[in-house]
Structure formats: structure tokens, C-alpha cells
Image (spheres, grey):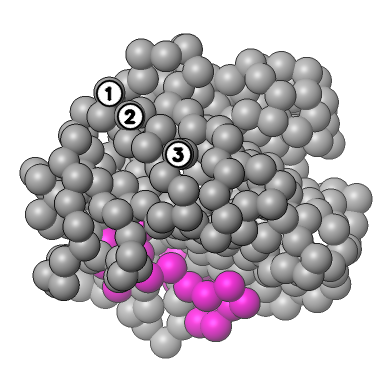
Amino acid sequence: MNRCLPSITLLLALASVPAEAITFCVDDANELQATLEVALSNGDEDDVIRIEAGVYRSISPDGFRAFNFSAIDADLEISGGWTENCGLRLPGLRSTIDGEFERPGLVLGGTMDVRGRIRIHGMQFVQGLSFEPAIAGGLTINRGYDIQVESNLFRGNATNGDDGTAAGALYALSEGSITVRGNVFVDNDADTPIQVSAGAASLHCYGIPAAAAFISNTVVGNSSGQGAPGDIGGVRVYGFPNCSWSIADNILWDNTGLDLAISVAGASLRYNDIDDLGGTEQPATSTGNLSVEPGFVSGTNLGLKRSSPLVDAGTNAPAGGLPSASFDGGPRIVGARVDMGAYELERLFTNGFDPTGF
């Protein structure tokens, strides 16, 4: 594990590091777990964990885990896609946590009085598996924090149990804010008989008041339950009415059962492409939404063809903000309006071809 103090060096695609943060560079699985444990016990210090590009497999049946953060007002940032010694972070490059269909990917949590921020970006969570209540196969962030999950791939993760809060790929619960932005969810599964489980993501906001946002994500081909109409293959949003949900610029398509389930009053639904919408509540506002075939490049490339009706069909100013970049590392707005979903079509490729798949 390389431990380094923050510098003022300008790094490609690097967000600013808090002045008092302790920064770590990680290049193997043992170092990753050890660094998480340091962050767990690091008092009120902010921690930045940079993970070199590569595949990381935990040797623990619990996956990579740090679940009892107790520091007040301390932030944790985990970013992937770094080159050797964390010298550069290249656009579109990611680090992979592979559960090998044996264990959860990454589990983070804190006590009720924690009020820091957790930010996860530039990662891939693949083949994670959970049998535990409220633990997703891919990524779990639970309690206290303001949560930001941006520009990650969730693929082939699963939960298999009877708990109603289960999620195949992502489970997030916060007494603060939640922002899930610019991610791709594909082929995740919640194999449970409970209809409030979600194949892609289950997001719970309990802040009073707080804001929550699900922005510019692509959610395709996920599944849940036993195939009943009320199953939620896609995403479920939930929380106290004081927590206002903004759901904008997403593609939620071809998931089993519901693509989106809204289980909280007051949600705003703007400029999404949704096949099947349901849940216990209706959105308070609904503007510019579509229900059309997305027009992906291919089954393995979820970028949009130039002919897609979702190109230039989003809103440039959603509550919660746009991702900093397209999922492939390119600019987020190219045309007059942002595209729906995680990818932005580069106009250089006028035939709609995009050489990067997921």
C-alpha cells in the first residue's frame, strides 16, 4: 500500500482532493482491505483511496468490507482506473471488484450519527453474490453518510435471500443525501420472492430534509423475483416524504417486471426512457418522459446509435446535476441537449458507432 500526502499536481480526470485528506494508492486485494480498515479507524480524518486499474478479488467470504465507521464528519472517497503508482486516472478506465459468484463486492457502513460523505466512482462491480439481509451483491453503503455513486459498472451481481430490502447490484441507505449518477447496471438479479427487492438498485433516503437523485444511468436487462408483474427488475426508490427524489435522464429498459418502482411521495420524473413504471406512489411531477426502444449500438455496447430517439432528449439541468463525463470518459453534453442514459454520443462517429462497450 502506498500512502501519500495530497499534492497540487494536476492529474487527468482527478476531482479535487480535500486539503486535509490522507491519500492511499492500492494495487492488490490485501492492500485494499487493509486500507479500508485504516479508514475505518482513522478518526475524523478524510480518506482518499485510489485503486490502480486491475481485478481485485477478496479472500474473505464477506467480500471487501468496512462496516462500522464511527467518525463524525469524515469523508471517504474511493476511485478506480488509476495507472501505476496512481500517477494518472485515465478517462473510461476502471478498477474491477470481482465477487466470483461467491461473495459480495464491497460493503461500507457507519453508525446513525455519522455525517460524512462516501463517494465511489470509476469502479466495476461484477459477479458479486449476497445471501445477507440489506447487503447487495455488488456495492452496499449503509447509514449516516451523504452518498455519491458515479460512473461505475454493475454487471452480473446477485442477491439470493428472503429479505425485502435486497438488491442485486446496489443497496444504499442514508440519513443524508443520495446521488446515483452516470452508472451502467446490466444483468443483475435479486432472486427473492419478496416483490420490493430490486435487481439493479434499491435506494433508501431517510434524511429530514434531504435530496436524492438518480440521474443519467443506463439500467438494462436486470431481473428480480419469480417473474410476476410486480417484481422490480430495475430500480426501487424509497424514503421519507421529506426526502425529495429527482429521477432524470435515465434509460430503464428491458428489466423483468418493473423498470422503476417509486415508493415515496413527491418524486420528480423528468426526461427518462422507461418501459414499465410502478410502485406504491405516483410521481409528483412528470415531464418529457418516453417509452421507446432505446436504440443501443448492440447488445454488448449500450451507447446510443445516432438514430436513437434518446439522443439530445434529456435535460441539461436536472436536480442533482449531470455526471462530470460520459460513461466512456468523453464529454457529457455534445449536442444541444444531453442524451438520456450513461453514454453521450460523440458526433465524430456520425454512423452512431462507438468503439467502447461495457
Please name the amino acid that badge 1 sits on.
Asn
One can see residue 112 in this view = yes
Q: What amino acid is found at the position of numbered circle 3 in the picture?
A: Ser
Callouts 3 and 1 close, C-beta under 8 Å: no
Please identify the residue farthest to the right as the structure is shown: 280
| Prevailing SS of the magenta stretch | loop
Residue under label 2:
34
Residue 251, horizontal then vertical, whole percent: 56, 57
Three-letter code for the amino acid on which mark 2 is drawn? Ala
Residue 278: x, y in percent? Answer: 82, 50
Residue at point 78%, 18% (across, down): 162
Q: Earlier in the sequence, mark 3 or mark 2?
A: 2
| Residue 256: percent from left, percent from top | 68, 34
Looking at the image, residue 166 lies above or below residue 309 = above
Residue 12's place in the image compared with 131, above or below, is below
For residue 41, the mark is 3
Q: Quadrant of residue 192?
A: top right
Marks 1 and 2, how far apart in space?
6 Å
Q: Position of 93 compared to 219: left or right?
A: left
Residue bounds of the magenta highlight = 307-331
**Height in image: 123 above or below 208?**
above
Label 1 belongs to which residue? 30
Q: Residue 214's mark?
A: none
State which tag comes first along the sequence, 3 or 1.
1
Residue drawn at 85 percent across, 58 percent down: 240
Label 3: state its secondary structure. Answer: loop
The span from disc 3 to disc 1 (Cα, nearest Å) is 17 Å
